Amino acid sequence: MVVAKARQRAGWVALAAIAVSLLVSACGRNAADRFGDAAPHPAVAKAHTLPIHGIDVSRWQRNIDWASVAASGKRFAFIKATEGGDHIDPMFRQNWEGARRAGIPRSAYHFVYWCRPAHEQAAWFRQIVPRDPDALPPVLDVEWNGESRNCPRKVPRAQALAMIDLMLREMEAHTGKKPIIYTDITFHKEILEGEFRHHAHWIRSTAAEPHHRYNDRIWTLWQYTTTGRVPGIVGAVDRNVFYGGERDWAYFARTGCDPRHRCK
């Protein structure tokens, strides 16, 4: 009897150890899925404490397994659609439909070329991007085109602001939602500081928390790494986080308005 009970206890201990091992393993996999990064920067670790994470993609991510992306817990995807006045990302339509089928809320973004008239760029965006009431607000990506062979120049601040204003208004008229402005540290400092306060801003800061890099800017979305790893995507992918919780996210996704702003 004593021996039998001892064996029974040993069996339960072994089963418990296996269960704990499986739980730890699963937690490790989930953590890797949520925060995988080939070159994590300790200064942006705060992004991991926020609950709503997503990605942004273009042709460089090639064929994406969107079902695996959804299963890893990603809550949104920004998908490159257009650039300038005549370029479409070759993976846009495939990514747009793939994310939709996987149930991932998605947004289309336009990359601005400063050598192309704003009205032509807005018309190109309208031509390519479907008017989908279930989509997230569109994004206007404003950076200098320093790496472009066709348009490696800057324009005066007043001209840049006028172009941005026109494209934002046209994108809102097309989609019915207030566009998001994506930018980097240099462009924000030279052009955007103090401007477009009623628009949500998606900012890039991969080596510091945003308040260290963006003067007087309430950010809505933060691109905190360009070396992320996500199931369903081969190689690196940009990872992003929303500033708030579920209620704020639901309102923002529906309207394009950051709940902290007085949106017109």
Image (cartoon, rainbow, N blue to C red):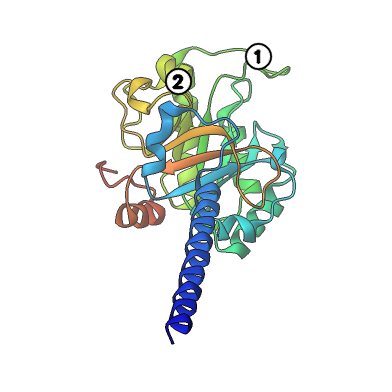
**Given the image, on which type of amino acid does mark 1 rest?**
Pro
| Residue 220 found in image quarter | top left
Using the image as rendered, state which of residue 215 and residue 199 is in the foreground: 215
Q: Position of residue 169 (x, y in %)?
A: 45, 39
In the rendered image, the vertical position of residue 128 relative to residue 246, given as above or below: above
Look at the image and tell me whether residue 174 can be seen.
no
Relative to 147, does residue 106 appear above or below in the rendering?
Answer: below
Viewer-proximal residue among 142 and 242: 242
Q: Secondary structure at mark 2?
A: helix
Q: Quadrant of residue 211?
A: top left
Is 15 drawn above or below residue 238 in the view shown?
Answer: below
Question: In the image, what residue occupies the spot 40% across and 16% down?
Answer: 189
Left or right of 110 on screen, residue 206: left
Measure the C-alpha gap from mark 1 to mark 2. Answer: 18 Å
Q: Residues within 10 Å of mark 2 (few under 14, many from 20)?
A: some
Residue 41 visible to the viewer = yes
